[in-house]
Image (cartoon, grey):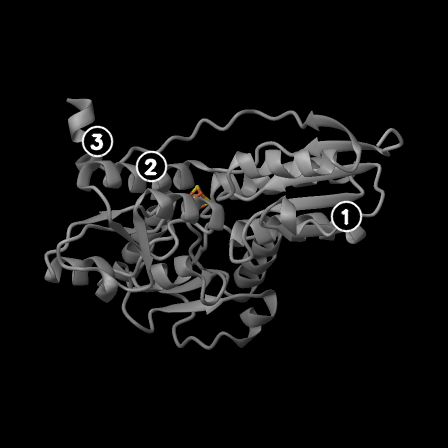
Amino acid sequence: MLNRQPLRVVIAAPRGFCAGVDRAIQIVELALERFGAPVYVRHEIVHNRFVVERLRDLGAVFVDELDEVPDDRPVVFSAHGVPKSVPAAAQDRSLTYVDATCPLVSKVHRQAQRLIEEGRHILFIGHSGHPEVIGTFGQVPEGSMTLVETVENVADIDIADEVNLAFLTQTTLSVDDTAAIVSALKSRFPSIRAPRSEDICYATSNRQAAVKAIAAECDRMLVIGAPNSSNSLRLAEVAERLGVPARLIERAADIDWEWLGQPETVGITAGASAPEVLVREVVDALRTRFDVTEEEAGHSPERMIFKLPRELVSDRAA
Ligand code: SF4
């Protein structure tokens, strides 16, 4: 106990909850207040087991598909966005639904629709199977959007009209990988239309920049986030690429102490869907084995706040 090795813990900033996740969680909480339990939620509201379990304890019921929702109960759509067919099916059944899609994902949806109206084919940079990608593909007619996952994919794109092209991206990608794919697209299709503003969201890029800022000081990096959380996976990748061995963990119990070894400095960050309480839990776990000195990296605070849906706040505003 007395001979614990000193350990410097550098906590990246910003980290953890973004405005879209915060809003989505509040939507479920407000829906529970407004309608009472149970409130159904299609898919994990955000990719974090801790968040999902807390909401489940409050009365949320998580389902994979709309047909699992009874006619007389409200349903919330997750922050990742849904194909157009989902709210349409809810309307057909006269279900009460609240859309918790992050406004920055909805912005990409609107851009996709506009580009299709202009007669363009969209090359969409993203990860196959991710709910956000499924939701965005579901905004446009089948066949009008092609998924591009890697720089290598660019050479294989087979499109008849190479002039009327545009690209969009998933919001939670690696800033560096996406820049490389965009550069390959622009060099193969010089007239391709770029989005008016960056689709990778502020939270994703700020969290990646925060990892880059502390990586040089760290011997190991712990990234708190779910294995299916795209932005969390990217944070671990960023650290690894800078030569810092990194592990994605859901919470303190997942720390592999053998892998961690006896480092001088450990970096900690958290994906956009991971609550701060899990960061504290990891620091506390480190304190049980090391003599920890904790510091937080300096940063400019994020000021993004998204409005809540009117139907859930109208009484409060009155
Ligand atoms: S990570 Fe970005 S796009 Fe996703 S919910 Fe947060 S702010 Fe919205």
Residue linked to disc 1: 244
Judge whether 158 appears above or below 260 on screen: below
Amino acid type for the residue under numbered disc 1: Val
Lateral position of residue 302 relative to residue 246, left or right: left
Marks 2 and 3 in Cβ contact (< 8 Å): no
The picture places residue 216, in percent across and down from the top left corner, at 78, 39
Q: Residue at x 58, y 40 (%)?
A: 207
Q: Is residue 165 above or below residue 214?
A: below
**Circle 2 or circle 1, nearest the eye:** 2
What residue would you read off at disc 2? 26
Q: Is mark 1 within 8 Å of ligand 1?
A: no
Q: Return the x and y of residue 146 as percentages of the image width and height.
A: 42, 69
Quadrant position of residue 205: top right
Q: Which residue is mark 3?
A: 313
Residue 161 spot, x, y in % from top left: 38, 72
- Residue 48 seen by the camera: no
